[in-house]
Image (cartoon, coloured by chain):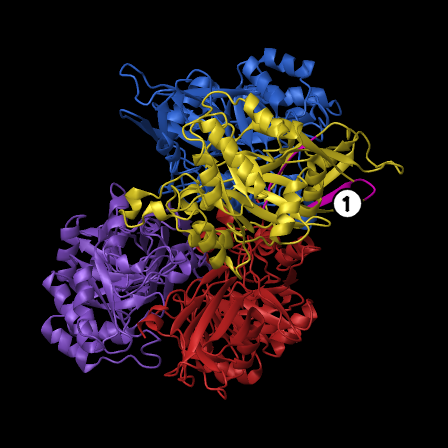
Chain colours: A yellow, B blue, C red, D purple
């Protein structure tokens, strides 16, 4: 009897699978859709950023980002301190950063979506992104027409953006500058919802991370989940790639890699957010994503079942044994790193031999996947 | 007013500080004590492992581990499948792996503690480690004297180990093999406690990770917290260093780097566990550890406070803004990677200028530091 | 005219291609043959090493090594200082390390070749490896029969090994202990050659690196080129993987992954040595290897030719422009890192438009590939 | 006697020392001087680059570069294809990129040197950098005054730059566009030398690497050695940091970290070039640099000498045993990676005991350090 006790050695062996360059994100497609990695919120020198538009494309190519929304603040004057008065912002065309970036992106595999950020100094309404715009100058004008009434100005801008066919996102509801201690959903936001002026919520932003309140409000109201870096500085100064950090992304499940398909997917809410090693999204999409990333083989012997899991993605998986599989003796907790494979050996609880009629089904809580704020996703390996 | 809105750029810049070789753990000392990194549980070919004792020392040197407890199963026959009958286990001296390892470790900076694992096939009592033993053969004999009565055998062994002056740890109370669905503290364990036969709980083990129940029981009863890899295979097959994983360790705060000082620290409960990026321990020790790892400077201007944090350790810090600092507008969430520094700019809530009499004090929940199961540690930067 | 001068920007863009886990070597197959990565020389605790045989297999799996030759010193007594007298070397069977390793390797994808090192205290003859042996005890006995006459003992051993069908390699002709200041080919070695007692030369060894003299002698006499680490300690202490170092290997081009096919390839001299970023071998094999590793596309426009090179291997390539392509204006020097791709834009020398009848052919010296000592390999991209 | 043969195990053990973040270059100071890491040649969107000036500073901070020379082509029109006609190059002030960069660099530890590149479409004279300029517009004007006579225009520009107190460098004498098959030193260059119009040679440039001809000409004529990336695109697209590549740099040994001290050091020829793992420079400086980077301890016993070498820098060292130390049995070849330490055990040739009067002195050729084209540096460890 002692012998069996002692065979605990090598119950789980970690083997390094062929992986990818650390900074280049790899996420497989799901059935029926391409998985596009998008950053929905970025700035350049054409508002208050410090980066030239082409460099934003270079960053995307280097990191494997497929979709970039150019969302310079529409109201922003060019960085005078940076351009020494040379660039005269009175003549700035609010479409320029998109024009430069999309020209440069040709043939490089990055879809560059036209857009802008409509910026209010207070909450409500805070900041909103309009993407798929036609002419940002008209949105600026619509806002300016309201004079000092910021709320009216923002509303004017939203309406004009919508008139152009834009997709509107409420950015960072939890931004510490505008919501320092609590995240409030204001009546104005509920009103925009009724008017069709908010399509998505930015539930992750580099500045303050994840917003549970924003996530829950989006789930409750059937809004699309998006993430944006909102980066104003070069990405290599914002993200510590060497420490394994990756750019937070919106995973967009699109019928093809085209601007139209991205729009269709956003309208259909087919997105999940992957940020700081966590994934947020609809249960069906999380299931499809997990099954695309993790390949597994189950081999049932007389005495044990061997479950081999191959992670073929840049997403880590944190597993905790969940209720409903009491008969299987399995590791309670396990990390599966990006591009790692893990082998799991399981016995039948209380028996030396697995009963002939035992059906293998093992529930794990995927502790870093969330279907709503605070609600993790449970998956059954079978 | 708009201008001020738009200066959100570069609120936090990540700069890579001189860091360390990824796999070599660096944890600074705390006031009055050296911080020793210990693995309290290991196996070799002298029980059911597959690694020669000297390699265990090579691993420690490579990873910066200071203390290694040699805890081969006392009952284990040598791996016959591995040694082809050449090594005749009838003649095995149960002290051999320690002898080989400690001889080899001389001059290499690794303290090798004599010990063994007292192994029962069932819970209770499960597996216990005895460290600081004198002669493992006598412990084996004490256990064997009980014949088939495993509980009695274990008790005999504990008593003999104590007679030799050993320090006893209840290993992996949550091991899936012996506690597949719930972690139970048995009457027997309470009884050992009364008899002084349990000094510590292994709250983290590579096989099943962290045990909240074990942690809480240790806290409740003033036991020492330890972690052990319980590794039977080479460390490079158990830990994915390339993905940034580190060996789980017991941080031992000892008066000096000596066997005696390690024992004194263990007896005085001066340990915390650092495993999978999380730290578990007593509040005062966590505070001392944080203050040893993070250096910070506070510079208060007219309009903003700048808090610069330097992480000088292999420990990551996950910060979430906590109650009690409502007046300061600070990032709600922040990662500080090992050897990274971060700069944080804060305004005074609702005011352009910081009031003259404002006292800076900013509470962050250290979301990966725990004082008890589920209870995070809160720190005030001031 | 100035404008054209200034378009020197972006002549070569480095893009990180999907790469592999740094330590896991990836070398593609060549037409007709599998490329097997072999370490032909290793030690364990069963001679004077400090590593258990199974760990040697774990290392190979982790690094992607396909073939391992177990070559413990045949004469070596077990490390008494390590085993505390417990392992009685009088009873050592000289086949044990191979038996343990090959048993453990089953199903893990590593071919374990039986062998031993025949060790003389002086040059000549120095150290020889015999691989594909049947019973190392008989070789030990043959050697011992010669008593104190080392030269005769070595010869006896070689003859007995050959009788068993072994493949014999002269190890590290340049070992600093036996050839401290010059590498000498002795009459004895020429005599062994005549008698068919030397099949290969170890032209790279971790201890002293590469031997130009040994390489040239092997080329001159049509011997097989091999590399061996000769490692006595764990590989993670010998090779600095984190700095990008890889284990030196013999690349064996075999008809299939089997012991028989390895032997056939060695007998047919189908090997090259890849060590410290350099590759040594026969011109035809180097060409086949380069063409397997580097995929390239040539696209000829009116004004320029674009050559895109994809490196799909762990081998770096150092290119220097060579004679014979004077008409093409190309970078004089270029590194192609493992798993990198590089784009090269070339103009026609002295003309704005490429002449209609110009045939693209660009010679690069592959400065880290050698066909003989000091003789680099030249490749024509066309 | 056999026993001693077999102790070849562990002759050299590689231990990973605390190292630095891979991409942040660390080079220690030498006696009397600070070691400043400089990139003497860079481009931005203000000529034909694609990067905004501030990003050039961010790159320097991230990589640990201390000195950056802003050398936009003086003649270059802004990239029309990139700026969509928005930036009107007729109004460009040729000093703007330096103004933006130097403003942004304040407090970030990067010295930004004013300069420009004087660009001719053919060799001679090719491209020259003028640094420490006062007003680039005047240099542009001086050049334009010569009309279509490029040679005269260049000469005018050099003279005007000198009048402003500039330091002039002949850039990439081996640039494939202007010297596709051979690197020629023209009469014009010799004439400039006489006139004091050339102070330095750029012996390394990212586009074509190292120029032996340029190096030798600089050595022959007592010119300063410099390196420049000449990068037009973001650094993370030019340098493969993940593969261990570093930005090529000019190491400037300056009395302090100030613009004046940089100038004094350049005038005094106190520079070496560190590029692609190789170092080029004057023998005395190479010696001082090696002794600053490598700390070593020598411990002489009865039977062996132990030499422990600690590399405390980002520079690798490639050692080959050199003539003059025949009595010491040492490894013939050795790599010392950045931040690695290596231990070397040596015996006395032909003797078991080291003679009492033996003086330890071991010559190694530093195979990646060059005092002139093709002439490596030899160092004596004693």
Of B94 and A151, nearer the camera is A151
Left or right: C31, with C205 as reference point: right
Relative vertical location of residue D17 with respect to residue C22 in this rendering, above or below: above
- Residue A116 in percent (x, y) is at 48, 42
Of D224 and B352, nearer the camera is B352
Q: Is residue A315 part of the magenta span, yes or no?
A: yes
- Residue C201 in percent (x, y) is at 51, 74
Q: Which quarter of the rendered picture does the N terminus of chain C lie within?
A: bottom left
| Residue C270 seen in the figure | yes
Magenta segment: A301-321
Residue at position x 69%, y 27% in the image:
B120
Left or right: B334, with A259 as reference point: left
Residue that sits furthest to the top in the current view: B194
Residue that sits furthest to the bottom in the current view: C357
- Residue A21 in percent (x, y) is at 52, 53
Residue at position x 64%, y 61% in the image:
C112
Q: Secondary structure at mark 1?
A: strand
Relative vertical location of residue B366 with respect to residue D247 in this rendering, above or below: above
| Residue C156 seen in the figure | no
Mark 1 — residue? A298
Give the total number of marks visible in the rendering.
1
Left or right: B350, with C377 as reference point: left
């Amino acid at each position: 009897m002692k012998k069996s006790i002692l065979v605990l050695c090598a119950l789980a062996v970690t083997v390094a699978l062929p992986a990818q360059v650390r900074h280049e994100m790899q996420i497989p497609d799901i059935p029926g859709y391409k998985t596009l990695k998008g950053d929905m919120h970025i700035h350049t020198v054409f508002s208050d950023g410090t980066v030239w538009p082409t460099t934003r494309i270079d960053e995307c190519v280097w990191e494997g980002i497929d979709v970039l929304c150019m969302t310079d603040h529409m109201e922003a004057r060019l960085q005078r301190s940076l351009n020494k008065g040379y660039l005269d912002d009175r003549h700035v065309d609010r479409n320029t950063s998109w024009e430069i970036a999309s020209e440069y992106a040709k043939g490089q595999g990055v879809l560059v979506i036209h857009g802008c950020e409509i910026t209010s100094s207070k909450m409500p309404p805070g900041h909103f992104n309009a993407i798929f715009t036609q002419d940002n100058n008209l949105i600026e004008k619509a806002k300016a027409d309201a004079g000092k009434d910021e709320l009216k100005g923002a509303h004017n801008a939203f309406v004009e953006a919508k008139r152009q066919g834009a997709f509107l996102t409420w950015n960072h509801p939890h931004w510490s500058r505008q919501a320092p201690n609590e995240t409030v959903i204001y009546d104005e936001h509920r009103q925009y919802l009724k008017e069709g002026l908010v399509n998505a919520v930015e539930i992750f932003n580099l500045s303050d991370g994840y917003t549970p309140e924003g996530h829950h409000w989006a789930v409750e109201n059937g809004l699309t989940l998006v993430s944006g870096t909102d980066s104003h500085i070069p990405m290599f100064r914002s993200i510590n790639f060497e420490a394994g950090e990756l750019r937070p992304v919106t995973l967009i499940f699109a019928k093809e890699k085209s601007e139209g398909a991205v729009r269709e997917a956003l309208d259909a809410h087919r997105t999940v957010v992957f940020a700081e090693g966590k994934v947020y999204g609809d249960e069906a999409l999380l299931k499809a994503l997990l099954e695309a990333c993790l390949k597994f083989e189950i081999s049932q012997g007389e005495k044990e079942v061997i479950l081999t899991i191959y992670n073929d993605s840049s997403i880590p998986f944190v597993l905790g044994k969940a209720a409903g599989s009491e008969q299987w003796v399995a590791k309670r907790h396990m990390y599966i790193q990006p591009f790692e494979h893990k082998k799991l050996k399981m016995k039948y609880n209380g028996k030396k031999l697995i009963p002939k009629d035992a059906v293998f089904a093992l529930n794990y809580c995927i502790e870093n996947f969330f279907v709503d704020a605070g609600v993790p996703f449970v998956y059954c390996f079978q």
